[in-house]
Amino acid sequence: MKKLKNIKLYEGGISSIPGKKQVIKVSSNESPFGPSLRVQKAISTAKSKTHKYPDGNSLELKNALSKKTKLNINNIFVGNGSDEILGLACQLFLNKGDEVIIPKHSFLMFEIYSKISGGVVKRSSTKNLRFDVKSILNKITKKTKIIFIAQPNNPTGFYLSKEELRLLISRVPKKIFIIIDSAYAEYVTDKDYSNGINFAKKYKNIIVTRTFSKIYGLASLRLGWCYAHTDIIKLMNKVRGPFNVNQIAQLAGVEALKDKKYEKNAINHNKFWLKKMNSELSRLPVNVYDSRANFLLINVGKSVKKLNQYLLSKSIIVRLMDKYNLPDCIRLSIGKSTENRKVLKAMKEFYNAK
Ligand SMILES: Cc1ncc(COP(=O)(O)O)c(C=O)c1O
């Protein structure tokens, strides 16, 4: 039996508060919107067909992805959440003792999947919580097999600029895989941002993962995809389960991709509130990091526990950041307008600010 003692259990944020009927849950970087109406219709149609196995190749969805992104269908793999793909990549590339470089304060599943596959995690350092390309390069040894880059990163919302990414990719030996996790890509509209796919088109050692959990509001259906060289896609197809993505998710994904208006609204809502929350919270005695994703990381110093208790008393659930080694921080996602106003009000009340 595998000894998994050194692997911490992934614990998501809490989703309820005892005694509170209605809560504002801004702890899991979820979309504040329900799925689009098109998606809801597709789900209603699909629900009477659950006695049949899904299409094991997710062909219709891959076609829809290929059409929307102009990427070759043979470079696309669809998974049960991008989570599954991260795990499959570790399973494929890691042998016991192989090293994996993960920048400090990054998505927890990178470490968990690496360790399950026998990987040894090396942490590169950060500068003001931003990934440091030099430090990543310095961590490379003969044993390095994978480098994980969350682009933008959870929990900071920072990303490596195109130029930094280019530098990193050019310096990393081609036998090392760089997994660029672009779960929040759609929210970032800055010119110096790259979701990594253009690099993955050029270099065989790059895999870019994407998800329907965030912008499309399909977290519960578990749907993600990745772009990589056909050799890697072929290997992923060998190791995945035969029906890894359920049919409801596949059909919902197809419809989600078609609903451009829903996507645009979600991006605009996020952009507006991200800026507003950042600027209003920055007036409080806290340090707000300049995220580009659908959440904000906030260093609240020693008041973190008291603040959390206060927010819970107001039915607001945010994420504490101990597991990310940021014990003085909270992370909160952008909610609906009414929710964001309540979060702002509660935060101001806590700090006696106007
Ligand atoms: C950086 C990052 N990657 C991947 C995921 C998980 O995505 P999925 O729901 O597609 O498994 C998350 C979820 O919070 C995330 O923050």
Image: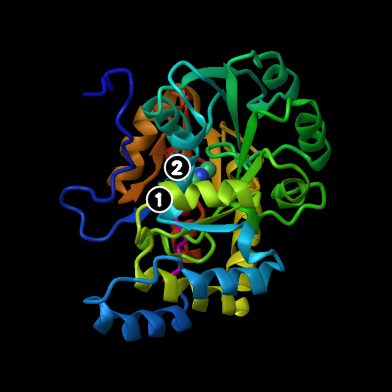
* Label 1 beta carbon less than 8 Å to ligand 1: no
User: Which amino acid, mark 2?
Assistant: Leu
Looking at the picture, how far across and down is residue 274, in whole percent? 61, 53
**What residue do we see at 21% from left, 76% from top?**
51
Q: Earlier in the sequence, mark 1 or mark 2?
A: 2
In the displayed structure, 331 sits above or below 247; it is above
In the displayed structure, 72 sits above or below 89; it is below
**What residue do we see at 60% from left, 60% from top?**
270
In the displayed structure, 70 sits above or below 123; it is below
Left/right of residue 16 with respect to residue 198 in the rendered view: left
Can residue 29 be seen at all in this image of the molecule?
no
Q: Please tell me how crowded label 2 is: few (under 14), some (14-19), or many (20+) other residues with Cα within 10 Å.
A: some
Q: Outermost residue, left direction? A: 19
- Which residue range is magenta in the image? 29-34
Quadrant of image for the N terminus = top left
Q: Quadrant of residue 63?
A: bottom right
**What residue do we see at 40% from left, 39% from top?**
319
Left/right of residue 256 with respect to residue 194 in the rendered view: left
Asked if residue 33 lies in the magenta stretch, the reply is: yes
Q: CA distance from mark 1 to mark 2?
A: 7 Å
- Asked if the residue under mark 2 is in contact with the one under mark 1, i.e. CB atoms within 8 Å, the reply is yes
Q: Quadrant of residue 154?
A: top right
Looking at the picture, how far across and down is residue 328, in whole percent? 47, 25
Q: Which residue is mark 2?
A: 88
Q: Which residue is mark 1?
A: 240
User: Which amino acid, mark 1?
Assistant: Arg
Looking at the image, which is closer to me, 246 or 300? 246
Looking at the picture, how far across and down is residue 308, in whole percent? 36, 36
In the displayed structure, 68 sits above or below 6; it is below
Looking at the image, which is closer to me, 122 or 73? 73
Can residue 173 be seen at all in this image of the molecule?
yes
